[in-house]
Image (tube, rainbow, N blue to C red):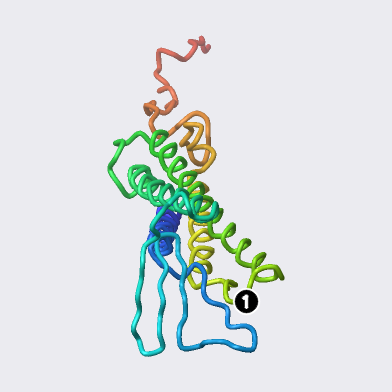
Amino acid sequence: MVNTGLQLISFTCAVTGWIMAIAVTALPQWKVSAFIGSNILTSEVKWEGIWMSCVYQTTGHMQCKTYDSMLALPPDVQAARALMCLAIFMGWLSCTVSCCGMKCTTCAGDDRQAKAGIALAGGILFIVTGLCVLVPVSWTAHTVVQDFYNPNVPAMHKRELGQAIFLGWAAAVILMISGAVLSSTCPLAERRGGYRRGYVGRSFANSPTSAPNLPKTITPTSLPLKEYV
């Protein structure tokens, strides 16, 4: 019962992290304008994502434009596109596999060894999904910080970390922790195919009951005969 509850909680958290990863992929707030220097324009904020760039004005008006050429993008953006798309697919595959291996489902019948292996595979896939999210987010954050402290980069081209970066870190941590917990809910005995609990040995519950050894009835013929004078 405890393992079933942990599986449900970890699976729910993993699905939440997967949905957050989808949101990170679609959000344009990966890089945000840095207001530094003497002459700054705070009425407009420029956002740069992996699919589009947007200009947000304080009046509430926003204009977005997708990138014209994929090959002209920086290497970190190209890698972020590929890895985030891979993370979305891996997250969908992880959810499907984990559903089949959970104890509260009827997939794989009563074969506990098969269900334990499937649940373990689903947890590992969630961990891989978290790594696919963590790599592009951390790479982009490193590029932003490196360009921010680079004196050769003009102030108008410097950017800061956007909200999508922090959301991506949170999604990666949730996915990896949930995958680890989901994998740990399969005990070692179940992974090896042993499901015996308690006393391992001869089972007295299912053994046929034998009649107790009753004392022999003493009959007169069984007594030795003695002659009395």
Identify the residue shown where x is 40% and y is 60%: 67
| In the image, residue 224 above or below residue 135 | above
- The answer to whether residue 155 is left or right of residue 113 is right
Query: Disc 1 marks which residue?
Result: 155
Residue 33 horizontal/vertical position (percent): 53, 76
User: Element at badge 1?
Assistant: helix
The answer to which of 65 and 12 lies nearer the viewer is 65
Residue 200 horizontal/vertical position (percent): 53, 33
The answer to which of 95 and 28 lies nearer the viewer is 28
The answer to which of 197 and 101 lies nearer the viewer is 101
Identify the residue shown where x is 57% and y is 78%: 34
Crowding near the residue tagged with mark 1, few <14, some 14–19, many ≥20 C-alpha atoms within 10 Å: some
Residue 52 horizontal/vertical position (percent): 40, 64
- The answer to whether residue 21 is left or right of residue 165 is left
The answer to which of 131 and 196 lies nearer the viewer is 131
Residue 95 horizontal/vertical position (percent): 36, 49
| In the image, residue 198 above or below residue 218 | below
Quarter of the image with the N terminus is bottom left
Callout 1, which amino acid? Ala
Q: How many marks?
A: 1
Identify the residue shown where x is 46% and y is 36%: 195
Which image quadrant is residue 221 in?
Answer: top left
